[in-house]
Amino acid sequence: MHLISTKAPLPVLSIVVCCMLAHSAAAQPRISEDETIRIASWNLLDAVSVGLIERKEPNKRGWRNTFGSERRIEAKPKFAGEKLGADIVLLQGVKNIREVRQLFPARSWRLIVSRQILRASRDGSLSGSTQIEGIGTTTAIAVRYQRRLRVTGTEHLMELSLSRPAGDAPASDTAALEVGQPTSTVAPAPPVRASSAGLAVRVSLSGMTFWVVSAALANDCRAAKDTRCLASKKLNNWLQGKRDQGLNIVIGGQLDPGFRKAGAYGACANQEIVTDKALNAETGADTVAGCVAFADLSAR
């Protein structure tokens, strides 16, 4: 797997109400000379397990013997997202925004995070310190700024994390939650379980349009013979709806094995990526940062 190294410092996230496109001018084109684009799927929990990311245990409430505000200093990741050598990164295991921004700096990456991070955070607001409380995690997608690769749409697949029937809550939220952009008021949180909401982004690559999806189904949903999983059915229905519109899909994360029927796939450990046959992608996996699955598509 081709790796891209960088010695540039990773800036601390500063979220302001501004246009994120202003950062794109400084980004260098990533599409390689053979005009392929790499889409990687990476669960940050794998990076934690191999020591590339340090996370503290969730805080337990108790008596303090000090006064004043309590500051928690989070260690910076020991890895740069650019080392994945990817143009698009489908992320799972996302815990807080600052950590992801240190991996994928705003000067080079457009970052879209699942709206679940607001609904599962302490006060429902978006800032550099926004994080999911407890043991839960969510999904995100990072897209490298470059001329021929554009984000043209976003859908939040919140129903993948609902513990009650999806009909009791909106099936999806088409308003993008993008780091660095103003956010609208978020509705009260519905009950959720430990599995993550999904995130889908529509991209245009040299005039070719397709969807990329990051998903992390619960373990019971990933059983080969388990047909009772509502989240898996909802995700499959969403995928089929896009295909019926003539759009192809790349999906990565922790998936139902049935999704592999769509086309080529690469997998390792608890991570896989699946591409629709029409994309003619080459797939594989690596352990550069824990388990990382990837797909290479032609930009021609």
Image (tube, grey):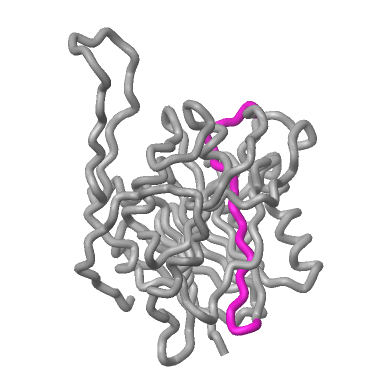
Locate residue 292, reporting x and y percent: 39, 62
Q: Is residue 82 above or below residue 59?
A: below
Locate residue 116, reporting x and y percent: 56, 39
Q: Is residue 110 above or below residue 182?
A: below
Tally the marks: 0
Residue 254 makes an appearance in the image:
no
- In depth, the one of 159 and 232 nearer the eye is 159
Question: Would you say residue 42 sits in the magenta stretch?
Answer: no
Locate residue 215, reporting x and y percent: 56, 51
Magenta stretch, residue numbers: 190-207
Q: Quadrant of residue 96?
A: top left
Residue at screen point 34% across, 27% down: 58
* 57 with respect to 160 (left or right): left
- In depth, the one of 235 and 177 nearer the eye is 177
Q: Quadrant of residue 278?
A: bottom right
Locate residue 66, reporting x and y percent: 18, 12
